[in-house]
Image: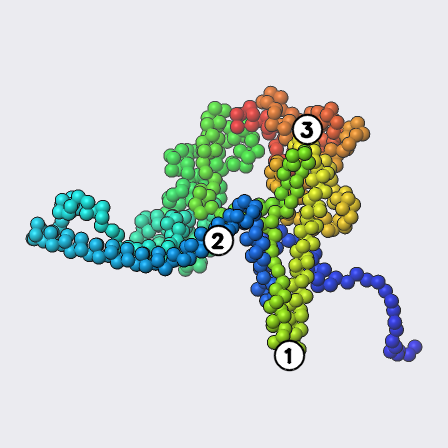
Amino acid sequence: MALSAKLELRQSQSLVMTPQLMQAIKLLQLSNLDLVAYVDAEMERNPLLERDEAADAREGEGSSDGNGSDAGEHQGEADGHEMNGAADGENSDWLETRLETSAESIATKLDSDLGNVFPDDPGVGAQEIAPVLPADSWAKAPSRQTVSSDDYNLEAFVAEQKTLGDHLVDQLMVATADPALRMIGQTIINEIDETGYLRAEVEEIAERLGAPAALVETALALVQTFEPSGIAARDLAECLGIQLRERNRFDPAMAALIANLDLLARRDLAALRRLCGVDEEDLAEMIGEIKSLNPRPGSSFGPMMVQPVIPDVLVRPAPDGSWLIELNSTTLPRVLVNQSYYVTVSRGSKKDHEKAFLAECLQTANWLVKSLDQRAKTILKVATEIVRQQDAFLAHGVEHLRPLNLKSIADAIGMHESTVSRVTSNKYIATPRGIFELKYFFTSAIAAAGGGEAHSAEAVRHRIRVMIDGEGPQNVLSDDTIVQRLRESGVDIARRTVAKYREALRIPSSVQRRREKQAGL
């Protein structure tokens, strides 16, 4: 069979992801912080993009009064300040000159008076100087230091926050003068994380510095004596042991308890009493003392910056009983396409590659503005439908949370499920009941016992927690009892599902809870 080349025409349909469509999809799933970073990067790359500062100014004016009277008054005040600027500058220079002249004259008089009164005494105290001048001279004496309003920085008066490393280094400089111990101690301090634990092995530090392991152990023992107590420990047992030694409470019974923290986590009190050789009352006292220790000694120094959650959607009740839903304008970057700049530059461009670059920048800028507007509309549409379907939750609480899935929202607003999934990722909504991620409202359904409306899994988990929180030492609820009570309230649920929800809530079993309550833990 001979092989030959030939041309054929075929017609087919396919979905093509254009760069603009990919950009719109990417913007849809970004959080507000990632969106701001993305827009800033685009503005640096595209000269036709600029921030809409006029919109921010209008928003600030609208928050004050809502009319233009205040703006006119403030403008008049600003004009007045500008008119009097030169006079204020002259007055300031004149006042500064007068103050410096007065200060020099007072200093000259002070030197001459002191020379007459105490000609041979080099040391004069403040209590001896005071009677020389008139009573009101001290109040009139100005400071030689002048402060300019342009150079005034309020942050210069804020005390610097001391980090854990700085606190330990200060103690190291006082604890030893040996340069070798100081160098090794500095290396150990650098390997301590923000919780106060040493995250490097002694052998690793010794090999890195070329020092004997015994000398590194000596430096580590020195650092472990610093404040806060328990610092530079390699595990929890060593951290608690250091603190107990400083309290002079590390006896053999306590050492046995520290060595068996896994039994304490499982609340196996009988095994602990046997290993420690103490009775029930002594064991309870020892456990109480361990609870008073700090398992994270470095957490009080240099806390990690916690980024607060900024909601993308705001929900508040309306006077007629409905809900007012609006986008949080502070999370939406405002950008404009500078058409006048494009016209000016395009007139001066003669080369083809310059014109192509400007055309590409204009197209990219227009698509970015359009994508941002479409993103805002889509988020608002999805959030409105979620609020409509979860109205009972907003009005009455988590017990009335309805089961909801992406398909229900997508069908209601006429969008695809993937679009709804992207919108609800990393987006938060502020409600009268708190700030929630949009995905919080999508929960699986649990069938009703009587064949009625299904229950939300989140609402069932809330009921389980309420039941367990209300139990007493003598009536600890087992999983079977919880299943029976839920079925009596109309929730058809299996025992393994209750156990799964309880473990997800980090609630121990009924046996462990009974031990804790009986021991008073």
Mark 1: secondary structure? loop
- Disc 1 + disc 3, Cβ < 8 Å: no
Q: CA distance from mark 1 to mark 2?
A: 46 Å
Q: CA distance from mark 1 to mark 3?
A: 78 Å
Residue 503 appearing in the image: no
Quadrant position of residue 52: bottom right
Give the number of the mark in front: 1 or 2: 2
Q: Residues within 10 Å of mark 3 (few under 14, many from 20)?
A: some
Q: CA distance from mark 2 to mark 3?
A: 70 Å
Residue drawn at 44 percent across, 47 percent down: 302
Say which label, 1 or 2, has the lower sequence index.
Answer: 2
The numbered dot on residue 479 is 3
Mark 2, residue position = 75
- In this rendering, the answer to whether 211 lies above or below 382 is below
Q: Amino acid at mark 3?
A: Asp
Q: Where does the image place residue 206, in percent across and percent down from the top left?
A: 43, 56
Closer to the camera in the image, 2 or 319: 319
Closer to the camera in the image, 425 or 193: 425
Q: Amino acid at mark 1?
A: Lys
Q: Residues within 10 Å of mark 1 (few under 14, many from 20)?
A: few
- Disc 1 + disc 2, Cβ < 8 Å: no
Apparent side of residue 288 relative to residue 412 in the rendered image (left or right):
left
Instruction: Check the picture and name the quadrant holding the N terminus.
Output: bottom right
Mark 1, residue position = 351
